[in-house]
Image (cartoon, helix red, strand yellow):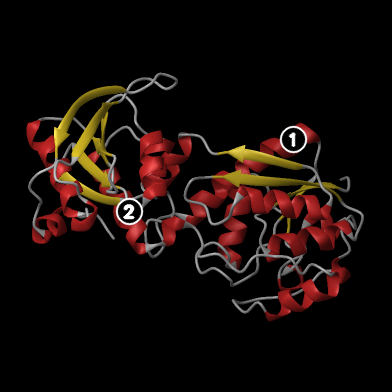
Amino acid sequence: MNKKAVVMVSGGLDSTLAAKIMLDQGVDLTGIYLSAPWGCCDKTVAMKAAHTLGIPFLVIKMTDEYIGVIRNPKYGYGSSMNPCIDCRIYMFEKVKEVMARIGASFLVTGEVLGQRPMSQMKNSMALIEERAGLKGLVVRPLSAKAMEPSLPEQAGVVDREKLYGITGRSRKEQMALAIQFGLLDYPNPAGGCLLTDQEFGIRVKDLFNHQDKIDLEDMELLRFGRHFRASPSTKLIVGRNEQENATLAEYLAPGRLLFQPDQFAAPSVLLLGPPDDDMNGLALKMISRYTKPEKRPAEAKVLVKIGVPRGNAPLQGETVTLNESIAQEELDKMRIGL
């Protein structure tokens, strides 16, 4: 067993501390960031942490197969649509592939025993390691002394006496270590994986209930705008601000229509599903409902754009005039989450 390892880097304090502890023991580290649209950390922040630590940085982008992990978890969901154990197994499997490619002997994580109720308990951690084919090969520097020694510790590749026994949800010990190590530029704890959020979970469940084939782009869209289920096959997303309007335009693709206000401040609407006169009219009513009266010109026009394959300019359909609105009660009946 060599002193080469990979470390899962989120950019947060725990993973940064774990990497620093290993570097101080002379471990040759490569940082790995797992990219998913519902993740709890930002790639730029993770990259910055790796740069500060002076370690190579690799990105593993989740593929559509990850959707199957979320949709049909073997070990169930947590408080929302978060299959934490299945997700962790999948991530460890992907990391294991990188380990084999670069010749790393073990994996380092910033996990803290008892910090998360589903995936960071002793039994869960042991299960995840075994299912991912990494039994005994995961070093958790922050909590190692509260757990059984890993194989690298037993082999003397990692000095167990220089590791820690932190447990629970408090971050006081980690913050003290950050001062000790001079790691003062770290982000505040994030809200966590979006899949643990109840409102986001409602959107995920609605998507799974109404769509057979789902890809990462479908999941990404759950993060933006107000969502409305108009029929089993049709959903409308209403932008909440100028930035979200621009984002919705980026997701215009075959099978989707974009209703874009022309030269007045109002939300755009992305229609997903088979368009017809009723659905098109509903999109216009939603724009009218969310347009401030003082921002609406006498003849408010909306451009209807038709999705085409990526790389081509969207086809403009017709220009229509905005007229009647929709009652809030009707919107509430269709609304998916917040």
Q: Secondary structure at mark 2?
A: loop
Q: Secondary structure at mark 1?
A: helix
Task: Residue 16: give x, y in percent of width and height.
Answer: 74, 60
Residue 312 visible? The answer is yes
Would residue 325 be found to the left or right of residue 246 on screen?
Answer: left
Task: Residue 65: give x, y in percent of width and height.
Answer: 46, 35
Along the line of sight, the residue nearer the viewer: 276 or 65: 276
What residue lies at 79% left-to-right and 43% top-to-bottom?
56
Q: Is residue 17 above or below residue 213?
A: below
CA gap between label 2 and label 1 equals 45 Å
Would residue 59 be found to the left or right of residue 193 on screen?
Answer: right
What residue lies at 13% left-to-right and 46% top-to-bottom?
285
Would residue 177 be found to the left or right of residue 13 on screen?
Answer: right
Residue 292 visible? The answer is no
Q: Is residue 308 above or below residue 86?
A: above
Q: Look at label 1 and name its amino acid.
A: Ala
Along the line of sight, the residue nearer the viewer: 193 or 228: 228
Q: Is residue 159 above or below residue 165?
A: above
- Residue for badge 1: 100
Along the line of sight, the residue nearer the viewer: 213 or 335: 335
Q: Look at label 2 and name its amino acid.
A: Arg
What residue lies at 74% left-to-right and 68% top-to-bottom?
142
How dense is the environment of label 2, judged by Cα within 10 Å: few (below 14), some, or many (20 and up)? some
Mark number displayed over residue 50: none
